[in-house]
Image: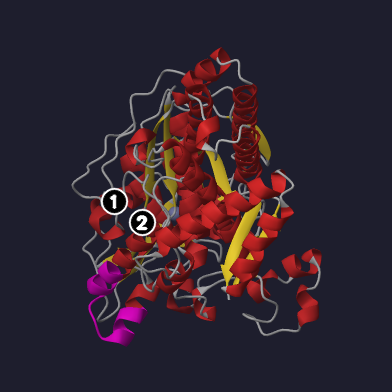
Amino acid sequence: MASASPTRDLNPNSMESGSASQGLASDSIRVYNTLTRQKEPLQTVEPGRVGMYLCGPTVYAEAHIGHMVGPVIFDTIKRYLVYSGFEVNWVVNITDVDDKLIASAKKRGIPMPQLATEMTMDYLANLQALGVTQIDHMPRATDNMDEIIAFISELIELGFAYENEGDVFFDVSRDADYGQLSNRSADSQLGEGGGAAAKKRSAGDFALWKSAKAGEPSWNSPWGNGRPGWHIECSAMSRRLLGKTFDIHGGGLDLIFPHHENELAQSRCCHGQPMVRYWMHNGLMRAGAAGKVGGKSDREQATPAESSEASDVGKISRSKGAGGLAKLIEEQTGDRIRFFLLRSHYRSTIVFGPEGLEEAGQALSAFYRLIQRFERLSGEDFYARGESELSYAKTRRDGDAALSRANHGLLAEMARLRKSFIEKMDDDFNTGAAVSELFEISRSINRFIDQESLEDSKSRTSESLSVLRSSMSVLRELGAILGLFLKEPKSSGGDGNASTVDGLMSLLIDLRAKARANKDFATSDAIRDGLAGLKITLQDLKEGTTWEQS
Ligand SMILES: [Zn+2]
């Protein structure tokens, strides 16, 4: 694996993954590979190590929620791989030179690098808010010009690329395997149009280097002043940081063609070996509220089949103004958005809308109430260990041992649910199914607290508290894999008293549950009616009771 040069790349965090060869679980993890269209066992280039690349943003405008899908998913995948014993090196690139950047900077009357820096900072702040903390390197295209130019020179030398009046193109006709990833032929690729089209040998050829136009930022090269095409950036930067063949390449489904097809062609032709073992693609996001984004009739989105076909209608994009991510995070909290994104399978389309977020928020608050309940009963701080706990390379195996020694019914249940969670994650990182195991865990622990009457200090024994503590540590361990429950939640739009209010509400809800369990309906009704008088409504869901103030 090529060694990284950390001084050149943004390093949004300095978290080291622990040394990792123990407890390796590569034989049980299966990954859906877009290239072969099937799930395959994860077999890495180097045992115990994973090199992972995700195509990052073109930083010409503020990020929107759709841009966060990939980072949240691959952040979770990295957490799970580390948990499974791998040492993971995760690279997310920043495209900071591009037609759109040039146009947008010009429009705002500021230099392109200033725009790129502003938008990169916006992107990083959003990642932070959504708990995406696992990226190791964020190389910028403009910091990697030497590698990009060297890569293009190698392709020309090998006969896979040609220069024409200062532009360089990849010659698709020289690559017999072109089109494998996207399952289409070179002929179906559209030409880039404009002046460059006339310089190509055939319409399917794509630009590696674009000659400078007056007033545009440019770099010196063997072909004169110019700038790189988008695809070549990723081939050059992934080679520098991850090597010629690396393990996982991720991105949204919309990048399969032409971007990933072209990356793959460049790297494979240059090196005579595969670029990537597993191509992973996440589903795209679609706006859920009918007519809200596209303005077409409600009928068009009435059934799932129709709406997926008409997905362009609701596809979240900058041009359709889904923006205001910072505001959305402030209103909804990063935790809630992250939880919302992880509730479905990463390959499916995510339907984004207020209902989904509301549902995610209610489900999440049931977990937070359990955590508050635990803290109240045990006097412990659930979050005290923080994210440093995540150098947990051995946890996957150690946890099994600890729980299998226990002979308490609840702990046996925890061991079963934990195993099931791991099976779901092993199966192509099915976070949606794994989340349902977390719900089961939460329900079982709440039931235990009720059955043992732990709310009553006289019924608490050191043994029952110890069982409670071990069960909660399973919730903490599995939650951390999804990047959840790592720190005390921020109440959305709350003030300084919000956590006290949450604590009091949690106490009242638990007292009501206890009264109902004892068939003391007079008390439970008095609590509900009293709260109604304060305009607070209780709602009993299968995940637990939630509350809302009108
Ligand atoms: Zn890329």
According to the image, label 1 marks what residue? 12
Location of residue 84 in the rendering, given as x and y in whole percent from the top left corner: 48, 27
Residue 335 against residue 463 in the figure, above or below: below
Q: Is residue 374 left or right of residue 298?
A: left
Residue 273 visible in the current orientation: no
Residue farthest along the left direction in this orientation: 7
Q: Nearer the viewer, mark 1 or mark 2?
A: 2
Q: Is mark 1 within 8 Å of ligand 1?
A: no
Image height of 273 relative to 304, above or below: above
Question: Visible in this render: residue 122?
Answer: yes
Kindly identify the amino acid type of the residue bearing the numbered disc 2: Gln
User: Which residue is at a point 41% across and 59% down the rendered structure image?
Assistant: 500
Residue range highlighted in magenta: 103-118
Query: Do labels 1 and 2 touch, CB within 8 Å?
Result: yes
User: Considering depth in this image, is 347 or 326 the residue closer to the camera?
Assistant: 326
Look at the numbered disc 2 and say if its residue's Cβ is closer than 8 Å to ligand 1. no
* x and y, in percent, of residue 498 in the image: 41, 64
Taking 119 as reference, is 545 left or right? right
Residue hosting label 2: 128
Q: Position of residue 502 (x, y in %)?
A: 47, 59
Q: How many marks?
A: 2
